[in-house]
Amino acid sequence: MNKKIAVLGSTGSIGKQTLEVARECGFGVSAVCANSNIQLLEQQIREFNPQYCAVGNEKCASDLKVRVADKDVKILSGFEGICEVAFESNADMLLNSLMGKCGIMPTLYAIDSGKNIAMANKEPIVCAGEIILSKAKEKGVEFLPVDSEHSAIFQCLSGTFNSYDKIKRLIITASGGPFFGKTRDELEKVTREQALKHPTWSMGAKITVDSATLMNKGLELIEAVRLFGVCQENIEITVHRQSIVHSMVEFCDGSVLAQMGNPNMKHCIQFALTYPTRTESLCTPLDFKSGLNLTFSPPDEDTFSLIKTARHAVSAGGTAPTVLNGANECAVGLFLEDKIRFVEIFDYVIKAYESIKPVMNPTVEEIEQADRQAREEVLSVSGQR
Ligand code: MN3
């Protein structure tokens, strides 16, 4: 295959795995992009010879220019540089694995330039899913989910005629995170180190904390509403500690399809990059001979209350999901800086969410504004400002 990809967030967990898949499948890489890890960017430029590289941090961008002066690569900087790479690079597909809602504009630019999108960055779908997906439809580009749950649902829907009209329920699986079974009292004392220890998936810090609060499932629920057009009442979340079943679809006839595999993001990345075909994978296959026990149980939504807030936000619509997401990004940031405790993430996010009235049918500018307002509210209720 001589497909060319552009990777936003190429030094993060998903970005690195995407480049491994590119190496294994023989894809070209037209662009790499990261915020500041120029040591790794230099290695990536030397191995993949991309046409463009965008570096978020200006100082790091100038340092990188010096380091790769012998290479024929155009180095761009800042947020504008990331957007320019998304639009200008000659890739067939853009894989977006940026962190947080900052991925909205680069995604829109990539769609505008006619690139297919492999989306690992869930916050833009949560905040601006309607705008992004209608633009993708208008431009006729493929929009493929890389998040494992949504990749699973997409795969389950691929085999049935008129499948989207026949969905009865989506069942999203959750690992339960490191604090599964803990009560609110027990959560009072948990530390940052404990929150960063995920039982099954290896991921970046922000999403690992989201998995510990189960906010990650809240965001994924909103993401599923946007991607598959199913209302939140018809989406169930189930705790599945083994992370083997990546999600399921129940159809109108009561039949349930599940997609399974070992918990390895390279499966989902490879599926998106090679779609609509399937290619050989180097990932370890499931081993049924040594015994496989699959368990499912409902999540504790009273303790991990952000799931309920996410259901409320997606039903409220407009900028409500943006407010929830912005408040959460800010609170998780404060927790990672040791400025607030784990349980305070729930308290401050919900407080901020409840105090801001959503704007309906928002523009991208109004989404940005709602995001800023939510962050300011968290800073103020947590006494950090
Ligand atoms: Mn996921």
Image (cartoon, rainbow, N blue to C red):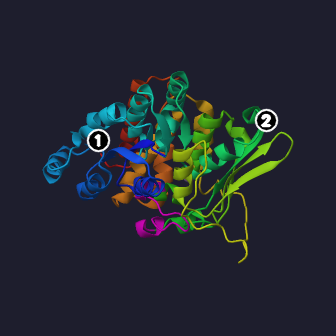
> Would you say the residues marked 1 and 2 are in contact, meaning their CB atoms lie under 8 Å apart?
no
Confirm or reject: label 1 Cβ below 8 Å from ligand 1: no
Q: Residue at x 76, y 50 (%)?
A: 257
Is residue 234 in view?
A: yes
Q: Residue at x 35, y 31 (%)?
A: 87
Mark 1: give few (<14), some (14-19) or many (20+) Cα within 10 Å: many
- The image position of residue 8, as x and y in percent, is 37, 44
- The image position of residue 273, as x and y in percent, is 51, 46
The answer to whether 28 appears left or right of 224 in the picture is left
In magenta, the rendered stretch is 191-207
- The image position of residue 205, as x and y in percent, is 41, 59
Residue at the disc numbered 1: 51
Q: Which mark is residue 166?
A: 2
Q: Secondary structure at mark 1?
A: loop
Q: Secondary structure at mark 2?
A: helix
Residue 108 is drawn in which quadrant? top left
Q: Is residue 310 above or below residue 263?
A: above
Viewer-proximal residue, 65 or 197? 65
The answer to whether 342 appears left or right of 287 in the picture is left
Q: Is residue 361 above or below residue 313?
A: above
Disc 1 or 2, which lies upstream in sequence? 1
Residue 339 is drawn in which quadrant? bottom left
